[in-house]
Image (cartoon, rainbow, N blue to C red):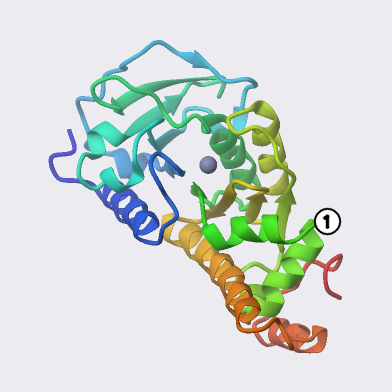
Amino acid sequence: MFNHHPPFLRTMAKTSHDMWTKGWAEANGGNLSLRLSPDELKGESGMEPKNDWQPLSAPLPNLSGAWFLVSGTGRHLRNIALFPEKNTGLIELDAAGANWRTRWGFEPTGRPTSELEAHLQTHAVIRETSQDVDHAVIHTHTPHLIALTYALANLDSAKLTKLLWQMHAECIVGFPQGIEFLPWMMAGTTAIADATAAAMRRRKLAIWQFHGVVGVGRNLDAAFGLIDMAEKAAQIWFLAMSAGGVQTRLTDAQLLAIARNFKVTPDPLILA
Ligand SMILES: [Zn+2]
């Protein structure tokens, strides 16, 4: 099994290594998942079930029979490239989308990320909203975005989005739907999974206050790129603040001109 390192494993290894080198994945921080198409698994063998079916908190019928490559709980993302069979695993959902089991990986014994519910609920939403285009979910600890949630009081999705759009001209093109601000919740809970999945009905990025960010995309590169763009905008804000403060910024008219030029429609509740 996987003697040839299929592309989905290589892209997971590269993305997780990039997250580490960016300073986004200390210790066992961060987790990734990638929904695989049947074509990507064609020809793979030696993947007998490794555990009994495990129930999800609620069925996800549109993920019936789906397979995912997922990072492992407690595992360090920087080690995925070195030992993918230990630090990641393949799981499948049953026909009802109500239970999961491991088919490969998490050696010698292990489980998917503790944020599995947030990942799977988000996958269920983005599969529907993207008409089956979006396949990747990344959660990571981007320092500048997290620091923003400490530096600024009374943040909400509109304020956070506007700030990032104003601080980096790419952002309104990269995420015209905005970034969802989710007030602090306990990690690994159904509450944070529900809130994150609900946010992804409207957007492709969500920030967990005092904790990290979640990004989605058609593949891991796309999800990584969106997070990287938002993180850079936050970093630019801090650089400007440390240079004496933000003296000027992109105006609403300039942002709208960028949006028109790149044929994107910003969230009208944030900018119209
Ligand atoms: Zn985290």
Mark 1 secondary-structure assignment: loop
Residue lying at 60% horizontally and 38% vertically, measured from the top left: 124
**In the rendered image, which quarter is residue 82 located in?**
top left
Q: Amino acid at mark 1?
A: Asn
Front residue of 5 and 97: 5
User: Which residue occupies the extreme left position in the image?
Assistant: 3
Q: Position of residue 113 (x, y in %)?
A: 45, 32
Residue lying at 56% horizontally and 53% vertically, measured from the top left: 215
Quadrant containing the C terminus is: bottom right
| 32 up-or-down from 227: above or below | above
Front residue of 129 and 232: 232
Q: Position of residue 37 (x, y in %)?
A: 40, 43
Q: Which residue is mark 1?
A: 154
Residue lying at 68% horizontally and 55% vertically, measured from the top left: 150
Give the left or right position of residue 24, taking residue 145 as reference.
left
Q: Position of residue 260 (x, y in %)?
A: 73, 85
Q: Position of residue 45 (x, y in %)?
A: 20, 29
**In the rendered image, which quarter is residue 53 located in?**
top left
Front residue of 62 and 235: 235
| 22 up-or-down from 141: above or below | below
Q: How many numbered circles does the render carry? A: 1
Give the left or right position of residue 272, taking residue 164 as reference.
right
